[in-house]
Image (cartoon, rainbow, N blue to C red):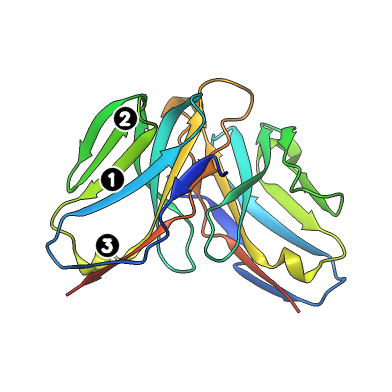
Amino acid sequence: QKEVEQDPGPLSVPEGAIVSLNCTYSNSAFQYFMWYRQYSRKGPELLMYTYSSGNKEDGRFTAQVDKSSKYISLFIRDSQPSDSATYLCAMRSWGGATNKLIFGTGTLLAVQP
Amino acid sequence: DTGVSQDPRHKITKRGQNVTFRCDPISEHNRLYWYRQTLGQGPEFLTYFQNEAQLEKSRLLSDRFSAERPKGSFSTLEIQRTEQGDSAMYLCASSSRQKNYEQYFGPGTRLTVT
């Protein structure tokens, strides 16, 4: 079983819809949670960065972390065609020597105009 | 503040050849990471530097792979005797304590081994 599970999609929504993207994880040591957006053949771009449980909002994006359920979510409001990309969740534990990230497989999102 | 840059962006090589990739991190970022991403998968950690010291290597990094970060600035990743299974996107990221060790990625180098 992978440490981080993410539905690969594809997920297709109409423009203006609210999008919900999710990941589950098994390692209770994870404390930092991130969402990256990756356009085709480009590097991942950091969207949201949260520590421990709770919500964080940035414009149309809201990240939620529920450590008790080992479940994280990214919500995109008023989705736009330009949001069409692969969304990767990533996480890491606190401390240690590396801060290496463990990624999900990514969810491919298509927002239809 | 320029982002992470990688060179080349694309590399096509024949099986058995050696290749070298370069990564220039965001200036003053003391941590530098290499990841590999294959089609339909998330990036997988390969190795990590803090300044010039290579502090961790994944078991994915076979003996044919070597990475350096002389003087704690840019880094190189070399693959010797390339195999078709090495075809992937090689991503570099950097981070700093001042930014909570958030990792910022470069555009990647896409390697195709024929």
Query: Does residue A30 sit above or below A23 in this rendering?
Result: above
Q: Are marks 2 and 1 on the same chain?
A: yes
Q: Is residue A20 left or right of residue B46?
A: left
Can you name the residue that lies furthest to the front here? A1
Q: Which residue is mark 1?
A: A74
Residue found at x 57% / y 60%: B108
Q: Which residue is mark 2?
A: A66
Subunit bearing disc 3: A
Residue found at x 74% / y 48%: B60
Please, what is the three-letter code of the amino acid marked with disc 3? Asp
Tell me which numbered mark, 3 or 1, is placed earlier along the sequence: 1
Residue B56: tell me if it is visible.
yes
Q: Position of residue B45 (x, y in %)?
A: 63, 44
Residue found at x 49% / y 42%: A4
Q: Secondary structure at mark 3?
A: helix
Q: Which residue is mark 3?
A: A83
Q: Are marks 2 and 3 on the same chain?
A: yes
Q: Nearer the viewer, mark 2 or mark 1?
A: 2
Separation (CA) of disc 2 from disc 3: 25 Å
Subunit bearing disc 1: A
